[in-house]
Amino acid sequence: MNRKYVRRTISASSAAAVIGVAGIFAATPTFAASQASNANHPPLTILAEETSAWTDNFNPFAVGNLQTPNGTIYEALFYFSPTGPQYNMLGTSMTWSNHNKTLTVTVRSGVKWNDGTPFSANDVIFTYNLLKKYPSLDTNAIWKSLKSVKSAGGNKVQFNFVSAQVPFAQIVVGDVPIVPQHIWSKIQGDPSKWTDPNPVGTGPYMLDKFSAQTYSLKYNPVYWGGTPAAPELIYPAIPSAQPANLQLTSGQLDWADEFLQNIDKLYVAKAPTTNHYYFPPVADLDIFPNLKNPLLANVALRKAISDAINRQQIDTVGEFGYEAPSNPTGLILPDENKWLKPGLSTKFTYSVAEANQLLDKAGFKMGPGGVRVSPSGKKLSFNLIAPNGWTDWNEDETLIAQDLKQIGIQINVQEPQQTDWSNDLLNHQFDLALESGNFAGNTPFEGFRNNFYPGMQSNYEQFSDPVMTKALNQFQASADLATQKKAMYTMESEFEKQLPVIPLVYAAEWSQYSTKYYTNWPSAKNNYADPSPATAFSNGVVLTHIKAVH
Amino acid sequence: MYYVKKFIHFIVLVWVAITLNFLMPHLMPGNPMEALVAKSQGKISPVVMHALALQFGIDNKPLWQKYIDYMTQLLHGNLGVSITYYPVDVKTVIGQALPWTLILVGVTTILAFLIGTLIGIVAAWRRNKLFDSIMGPIWMFLGSVPQFWLALLLLYYFAFKLGWFPEMHSYNYGDSPSWSLKFLSDAVWHSILPACALLFTTIGGWMLAMRNNMIQIISDDFIAYARARGLRPWNIMMVYAARNAILPSVTQFAIALGYAVGGQILIEEIFSYPGIGYQLAQAVITQDYPLMQGIFFIIAVVMLLANFVVDILYTRLDPRVRTEGASA
Amino acid sequence: MSRQDANTMEPQSPPDARSRAPKPQWLQAIRQVFKEPKAVIGFAILGIFVIIAIFAPYLARFDPMNEGALPPLTPPNKTYWFGTTGYGDDVYSQWIYATRTSICIGLEVAVIATSLSVILGVYAGFKGGKVDAVVNWVTQVMLVLPGYPLIIMISSYIPNAGSQAIVWILGLTSWPAAARMKRAQAMTFRTRDFILAARLGGFSDFRTVCTEVLPNMVSLVFNTFISMISWGIFGEAFLRFLGIGSTRTPSWGNMLNASQNGNAMMEGAWWWFIPPGLSITMVILALTLINYGIDEVSNPRLKKPPKLSKAIRDKLRLQAAEEGAV
């Protein structure tokens, strides 16, 4: 029904960040003595993914695995929050050497798998080499950048990189779940085809009961970080937005990532003291122009388009007031404030007159039917694509078309099926397209690289700019904050000058939480981690940071 | 000889259905990886494409090769691995969903048939009397209501607003399927609203069909004869008239039961009922070819089987058919 | 054979009569239909909607899709007769235009599906032999494919599926059951005297079908046509509700879809989801009534049972008594 068609959570789980920047270490939750499900510590009911039925599959490497065992059952070495902090999970420290081509990670000691077997650096080395042996497990393509992973003696593991790619190391040590050698070495054949029905991990929770309708996790009594506040997690299978919204508003969900219009009235007002939401901006909603189109390659045209769009209206009418107008630097503010080049403007001008002037100056003359014509005689008429049924984006498309009509640009709104739209993007078969870009990360680097580095899959617009490319290369070769900042400033200026994509509004991530029994959820004031229950690895961080009310 | 011919006919139809079943998804644009990446809306970066291709075994084998592989697998009872629920195999997904659909849709189909037919019999018998003139319009009206709209209204008022019934699922959290009284009553409780949506909208069709058939039979001479002989009206109605009039309805009923296997896409989704209809819609949207093919396969075979059984049944009940229309 | 081939489509569709008079008197038949109160009510309801569809531009008060210019979720009042949607559109104006779209889609689907079912069913049934065998095969295979999922799948081929695409998808997938029914009936004509006479008279098959067979199937064809309008309207609502196709044209299905996406029920905005749902119900009801009325008229066996004269009854009773005595 609507959910699979309404755009939902944008999450930056794969966005990476830079190491050596943040220094906040995970606070170890206090060890609460034996907790059973009682009135003060009831189970948490969580909606992270919509599905009509769960399947008995907890394989952490299966792409699109709805059960999201990563973070709750399985852990990675580190967690890099898109909001800044870095958390030590199974790794406790890391150091660069060999011109930033070798990373040495110290592995946490005293950790046990939830079946009681001790965890060691060998499990880590085994996991990484398993990904090398079975590329089907290597969902982040880390072995394209890695040369070898081996023991550096004792509890130390050494990662050797092909070239200096400091930010990418965050994916290598932050996005790979560590699995037990004593179980995974016995799997016959390709481990990606194994359903892992009894997952053995190091995380704060372990599988309790499973049925196709609901599965539950119970706390792991041997967890290295102590006992989490909620003794039990319940995951009901909810197939679409409508039942999910009913469940949420009738108070049957404690933590969810639902898109809900009129949330203040429909959700918060039902229980104003306990029902809360946090919709942090995690990316830009951009217009991607196809820069291989000779007209759109003209920066004056892109600037005119940008000037003529009423971003406030897109926020209030198209996006229900949840997604504030974005800024012309390519940064996601305020989370990435510390990377902002001093003196750079963070506001778009909205001026139809200025847009018209720009176009006049560039030689686009008004033609018949109120559509401008380029000096070479081409009409300024473009297709704009967004997936069919993502109703908010479809609404935005209409608004954009109306805005651009005023400056003599004709927009043909198109709504291809989701798959066709994504195909068109990947194959660069479009004039203008709506898509999220510049995903926020622990640093803005990954967002810039994905969208603006030549040859990247998400460089849908085919931007290739020597200044930007050079700055990106400088950034990733360095582990030094000052050097990185300098490179970042260059990228921001270049972005503002070139406008390779046209940011409209911030894309928000949805999250709702109830403080009836548990507090200390990520919020605007306390954004210690990604707030969505669907984001792998960060969910584990949140679940070990929430506290029982009583 | 007649049965053998029918059976061969059945087998060939099954083969055609399987072949079509194989071809259709492959004629669809796009592939499941792209569907998954697009569906994830940024959660899965395009970087995973390579690993995905390896996981899903997407390859560029020629179509005929895939066809042979598919048929071989099928002969071994292997329906492949689902992509949405990767790496769980299709048989497991169907096995989980099918019982719920069979119970909900199957039982309501039977109930609708029984209730509708009974009302139809009585309405025809008391034609244009009070019963007929009340029942006719009521069920005709309900039969005209879009099923999903009725389902939404029921869900909203009786589950969300009044809280009399559960909003979703087929049993409570914490229960596990068993034959205990507690579980069964729980399951029945959960199925009432969706069952009502299905029942209210389908009884009318059965009623009208039966009423029409009955009226035709009633005008037959032998009923007049029976009446004249002074047999008890109830007896004539049920034994003489209804038994003869029900024949066309029975064949439709067999086919409706066949359809029941396909589930009810919208009803199942609206009530979050873990059945096959929703899985199928989901499979089509996410381009989960193996799951789609698996479900289509089951539906096609059951449908053909239902048709086959109806054919055989008919020959038994009405021997004229055998000589008359052997061509079908 | 004809009974088995009774309407095997969705159980919601009205049943079709099974045997017919050889040559209905046209005008008289129409007059008779209008004597059936059920049919009259049906035609009256349908008439209202058709009038709304025709005069939509004159009846609408606002632009049906004006993207948020009006205050959202306003309950019905003097300005917004049916209130406004969560997106700030006038429900009344949307409903007026939606009526037009949905009625048109229903009619177009009916034309396509009925034509196909007549061409394939009647011709094949009448002709027999190889043509019949092939058509019958195709029909049987089509009947086995699950309807709605098939339609969803075909729809996903067509990006931006507008009303026309939906019409063709629904039209091209809904003929088999009706064709099967027609084939069964056409088959019975093969051996009838007047057909044989026509054939002996040197009429071509086409001409025989047109002049001798079809006129005898008018009520069945009309029946199919009416059922297919229902199917088209239901089908459109189903697909739109699932979110398939463009959301830009106002239609009953799109209105329901939008109200669902906009949480109309949770907001208590009954004025948003009641009009489209109720309209679908009323139109389908009207069509069912019409079909029902036609049935009553065209099928002699559905006519009021003849009262046996007292003399015959007495005679029968005597006979029975005698039999009993033997």
Image: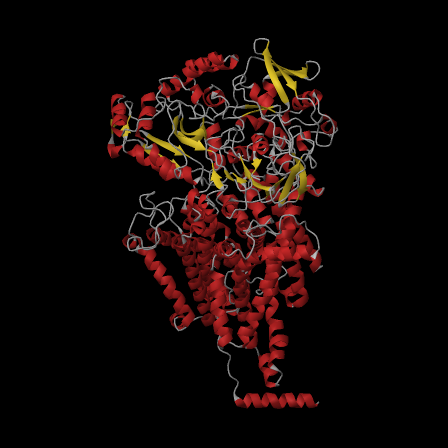
Residue A72 location, quadrant: top right
Q: Is residue A164 left or right of residue A383?
A: right
The reply to whether residue A364 is in sight is no
A118 versus B315 height, above or below:
above
In front of the other: B9 or A75: A75
In front of the other: C323 or A44: A44
| The N terminus of chain C lies in quadrant | bottom right
What is the residue that sits farthest to the front in this orientation?
A550
C148 versus C195 height, above or below:
above
- What is the x, y in percent for residue C109? 44, 53
In front of the other: A474 or C224: A474
Q: Is residue A108 left or right of residue A289?
A: right
Q: Is residue A173 left or right of residue A419?
A: right
Q: What colour scheme governs how the chains and residues are painted in the rendered image of this protein? A: secondary structure
A517 versus C106 height, above or below:
above
- What is the x, y in percent for residue C177? 53, 57
| The C terminus of chain C lies in quadrant | bottom right
In front of the other: A376 or B94: B94
The reply to whether residue C73 is in sight is yes
Could you tell me how many numbered marks the image carries? Answer: 0
Residue A207 location, quadrant: top right
- What is the x, y in percent for residue C164? 41, 47
- What is the x, y in percent for residue A402? 31, 36
